[in-house]
Structure formats: C-alpha cells, structure tokens
Image (cartoon, coloured by chain):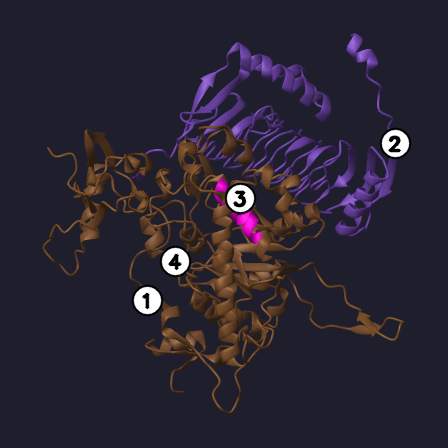
Amino acid sequence: MAKESTKREPEVKAVTVDAKGVYYRELNSRVRELIDDGYTEIVLDGVNGQRYIGDGLTDKVNIIINGVPGNDLGAFMDGPTLTVNDNAQDGVGNTMNSGKIVVRGHAGDVIGYGMRGGRIFVSGDVGYRVGIHMKSYREQVPIIVAGGKAGDFFGEYMAGGVIVLLGLGEDDRPMVGHYMGTGMHGGAIYTRGEPAHNLLGKEVSVFSLEDDDKKLLGGILSEFCEDALIDGSGIDVSDLVKLRPFSHRPYGSKYVY
Amino acid sequence: MPGTLVPSEFVVYIDPERCRKCKRCVLNCGFGAFEFKDRTIADSSKCVACHRCVVFCPEEAITIARNPLAFRDHPSWDVSLRKSIWRQAATPGMILTGMGNDLPWLNIFDHLLIDACQVTNPSIDPLREPMELRTYLGRKPDRLEVEPDGNHGFRLKNKVSNNIKLEVPIIFSGMSYGSVSLNVHRALAIAAEQLGTVMNTGEGGLHEELYPYADHIIVQCASGRFGVHSEYLNAGVAVEIKIGQGAKPGIGGHLPGEKIGSEVSSTRMIPAGTDALSPAPHHDIYSIEDLRQLIYALKEATGYKPVSVKIAAVHNVAAIASGIARAGADIIYLDGFRGGTGASPAVIRDHVGIPVEIALAVVDEQLRKEGIRNLVSIIAAGGIRSSADVAKAIALGADAVGIGTAALIAMGCRLCQKCYTGNCSWGIATQRPELTGRLDPDWGAERLVNLVNSWSTELQEILGALGVNAIESLRGNRERLRSLGLDSTTTEILDVKPAGR
C-alpha cells in the first residue's frame, strides 16, 4: 500500500485526430509527432484501412482507433496500447515485442506472427495463421486471446507464449481450422472444449488443466473480458483444455550427421 | 556387425621421429581425433582435414592424407554416393552438411574473360590516376533535376532516397550469430568499419556489444524473427528481409539447441537449449503484395531506411526480382547456388538453385527491359572467390558483391564443411567457449581488411587495363566480357559475346 501511495498517476494529455482520408504515411508520422509532443492518449477518428498504425512505436501511449485500421497494426510495436473499436485486418501485432492490442470485433489473418511479448485480445473471430512462431523470452510471455473462432494453422511453429481460443458464438462452425499447433515446440494453447483430433498438428497433445493453468487463465480471462467488453460470466475455466508440444526439439531426428 | 560401413575420409599420420609429445594436437582438435596414452594416438575416423593440428604442430610431425583405400571404379556410382547410402541405411535422416555446393558443376565465372585496352584506346595506370571504387546502394531517382541555389551555384531539386555509401563494392554476407561465433561477428564489424563497407547480421539478431558499429551493419529480418525488435531494426543502416539463401533455397533453418547457449539465447531472444526453427516461408509473406506490406512496415518502423530483399537464385528469378523491385525494395541480394551455409541438407545444397552468374544476368536484363533498374541496387553473392569474380559480377550487372565463405577462409576456415557440428577447431562455426576464444577479433579483422584491400587493388588494376577509372563504368558493361568454352545458349543468356567476336 505504501508503495502505491508514492506512485503518482502520470498526467494524461489527450488529443483527437481526424484520420478520414489521410494517407497512412501522413497519419503515422502525425502520431509520432504527437507522441514527441508529449501526448499520451491519441484518439484516431474515422480510420478506414490505414496501414501500420502503431508500427515500431516504443512509448507507453494509448491509441484509440475508431474505424477499421489496415494491415500490420502494431507491427514491431514495443510498448503502446492500441484499442480498436471495430474490426481489424491482417497482420495485427506482427513481431510485436511488448504492449497491448485490443480489437473489439473480428481480426484477419496472421495475427501475432513471431510475437515475443505483450498481449493481443480479439473479442471476435480470427483468421488463418494466427500466433505462428510466437515465442517467449525470460519475463516476456506473449498472450493472444480470441473470443470467437479461428482458421487453419492456429499456433503453427509456436515456440513460446500463451494462446487462448474461447470459440464463443452461436453458430455451429468448428472452433478452429486444420493443422492447429503443427511444428509447435514450446508454449501452450488453451481451447474451450477439446478440438477434434483430426484438426491437430502431429506435434501436439491434449492435456487437462492443472491448478497453475487455471490460475493463469483466470487472470488472463478477466483482463480480456474487461478490455474486450465481453460478459465473462458464461465462461467456465474448467471447460478449457491445454495443448502442449511433445518436444522442444521436433526436428532433432530429421538429420544424419 | 560392424559399427559403420563408411571408411574414414582421411588418414592421420604422426611421425614418431618428430613428435615431441607436446599434446598441442590433442588440445587443438575440436573433433577429438587425438588421444594421449604415453604417445599421441590419432583416430582417423574423426578427422575432417581442418588442419588445425597441422598448423599448430611445432615439429611439423602431422600429415593428413586422403584415405588411399581403393574402391572399385564405377562411372555412375561415385564413391560419395555409395557412402551416403551406407550412412542413411544406418541412420534414417537427411544428410546434413555445411559451406557451399561441392559438386563439380560448371563454374561460369571460370569461363568468362575480361577485356583490356591495346593501342587504339589507352589503358590507365592506377598508380598514376585515382580509381573510383565507391558505390552507393539503394534506390536512384528516375532523373535528376537541379535548380539554382541562389548563390551562383546549383542544388539538387529531387529528394533522393537514403543510400548506403560503400568505399568498396564488396560487403560481408549475412552469417548469423549462432551459426558463427561472436568473435566472427566482432571481426566482421571491425573490418567493415575500417573498410567503409557493411556486414550483415544474418538472422540471429545483433549482440548488444556491436551496436556501436551500427553505421556498418545491415540487420536481417528472417522468417523466425529472432532478436527482431524496434531497437534492432533501427540499429543498422538498412534492414534485409531474408526470403531465401543460395545454399538452401526454399527451406527453413534449424539451429540445433546445442548451439543456443546463454549469449546466443539473449541475442536471438529465445530460451537456451531449444531449437531455433526458421520456417521455410515468412508466414506473413505469401505474395509480392505481402512482401510490399512487410517492406513498408519495416520502412515505417525505421524512418524509411533502405530495405534489402535477399533471395536465392532460382529458375524464375528475373520475374521475382521484378516483383521485389516493384514492391518497394531498395536492394535485391541474389544468392547463387554456390553460397555457403552453417547447415543444410546436402541434397538441397548440391542440387537446388542456379548459378549467380545466370541469375544476375537475367535479373539485370529484366529490370532494364522494364525500365526499373534504377529502383534497386543488386548485390551478387554465392560463389564470389576472387577479385576476378567481383569484376565479372559487376560487369554482368551487380552493383556490389557479398562475400561469406571467402571472409571465413581469410580467418582460417579450411572448408571442412562440418559447420553444423559446432566443433569448428578454428573457433569460427562454434559456440564452445574453449574454441571460440581461438579467434582473436582484431586478428580476424586485420586479415579481412587485408583481403578486401588486396582485392580492391586488383580491381583498380583491372579497371586500369580496361581503360576506365570508375567501377561505375564497368557496371553492367557486358561488352567488356567474353565467354570461352560455354555453350551458345548459356552465352546468349549471359548476353556476352564469345571470345573472338
């Protein structure tokens, strides 16, 4: 308690930018200028497909995006929090190092590719190739949570981190596409309900949750529901299962020396 | 049953008259081929002919010979094929190897001859006149416009893209920290700075100790995205997207967990001891449009530094290169099928891809034909062995060349092709601390500087003989090349005349 009282809330310096019809290069350099000028909360109104928003930014700022941002949202990002009050397109959080991206809608393909830290929360569905080659390093543990369903190659080549797939939604499509966790050699994927075995890559197996998993998921899911504006009361952590790889060295026996 | 059906490749002989039992050979062999039991005993089956023991034996007592064991000759069953079959019948798996293609494919560079001036157009003496080797890598404008600067002079009206200034048209190719030791990276960085050129990190990230050499480093972003973050991307003069590598086109890389100790782990930003798997493709690039997206994502993240795209030379390389140029790349790095590697399945290294000479010729021609040659610089690599190769590559259309294997040979590499074992006795392709300490970065850098300076002098001599005084005048000047002993189709593809025409 004593520690908290000495912490001062940093002052929020907010600004709203009308992004309607602004070319991405101009928009992104405007955002950088505003950050250099000390703004900590930047609201982008009327966003419609501009690429690379948040790309390579390293300051701990909040960027609120009203509209649908273009591809590679938050690529190489290292610190900021991006909140999208709409759908997002492909490449969200590409090779991201830290920070948070919240999408209050659906997101496209290749989400969190090669991501090493930070969080990506998508309230709805995600497309193909999500979480490919995510990796963790020391204290950096990347987390992706998708509230809806996912396409093929979910968590392929995954080397570390955590992916949670909740499969919420009324329709009866399968929760995930084919080849989930193919080539996976680290980290964990949690799915709500056990996926059909023909959808799994040959490097993974399904486990039931231990107490540590439940504790981890409890924390992640409450943060996710709060950020993604989802009513989490219907989600029972005990319904989730864990997918882990057999080996950290899936290709160790592929060669003759 | 016998342990192996494969006889030793080499025979190690220690002259008992000369040997003083100093055990230097025992200590120096990274492969454990020597043992000391009241005298030194060699296990020839472990010898890779890396010559470390030979060089360090104070008495010159060690001889390494090819195993003279005779095999029944058979024209279509080369002994190496028989050995491969014995090995794969013993253990299932792909045969792994290191360095470049070692099959005796036609070497086109060795069938190209350089022109010289005689009588009617005078040659230039480089001792007397300056010879310009300086090269700029990056996008060049379609045209230059000048305007008065208001001070009786003129200034450039166009905005010119960022270019990388090289004092010599030779750069050090990407070799990752992990496949090679940190001391190799240190030597390359020091040498690049002294020479006014650049080194390339390869895909294993950049050790924080080397950040001060930023002006002489190109950082690589490969499919595994190891050690790639905002600070790293901004650390160099350019970013290279590695799509492929000449030694192993189309396949990914697997750095074995044994090579990932704490330092490599911290630079790659992955846990120690796990395999570092680079997927075969970038999973965010399935098309030229996707490539464009990553190129501009990197430009946005780096304040619009030049972006290079490295591809292996493959059959359709000209069309691919055109796509890369149009996707916004500033540099195309063409890696021929003789390019080196720390580890590749032998079947891929030896049989996949095409020579860089052909790739270079067709890419340069295609880009010219489309009127977009100025959009990109071309770096040719994968088989550059001498200053003659440099001159020929530049005449075929390269802006600069990349050297990897030649740089390692300069630092002691004997081309034993065992990089993937991590046992390199010369301290190059290893992470074993007792071995990496053998390569003194300053010694390595000095040898690299000597090598490149020697080649530069030779290049200047070649330019003088050609009667030109700038490397720019040789660039793409195929009229100054002639082919000898090449078939007419290859000569036509290279767009050079045969000798005598």
Query: In the rendered image of this protein, does residue A212 appear above or below residue B39?
Result: above
Q: Which residue is mark 2?
A: A13
Residue A214 to residue A61: above or below: above
Q: Are marks 1 and 3 on the same chain?
A: yes
Task: Say which chain is purple.
Answer: A
Q: Earlier in the sequence, mark 4 or mark 3?
A: 3
- A30 lies left or right of B50: right
Which residue is at the front of the view, B189 or B136?
Answer: B189
Quadrant location of residue B7? top left
Q: Which tag is nearer the camera, tag 1 or tag 3?
A: 3
Q: Mark 4 is on which residue type?
A: Arg
Q: In the image, what residue occupies the spot 38% across and 83% down? A: B499
Disc 3 marks which residue? B186
Of helix, strand and loop, which one carries label 4? Answer: loop
Number of residue marks? 4
Residue B46 location in percent, x, y?
A: 24, 39
Q: Chain of mark 4?
A: B
Query: Measuring 45% from the left and 53% from the top, which residue is drawn there?
Result: B407
**Is residue B174 visible in the rendered structure shown here?**
no
Spot occupied by residue B261 in the image (x, y as percentages of width and height): 46, 30
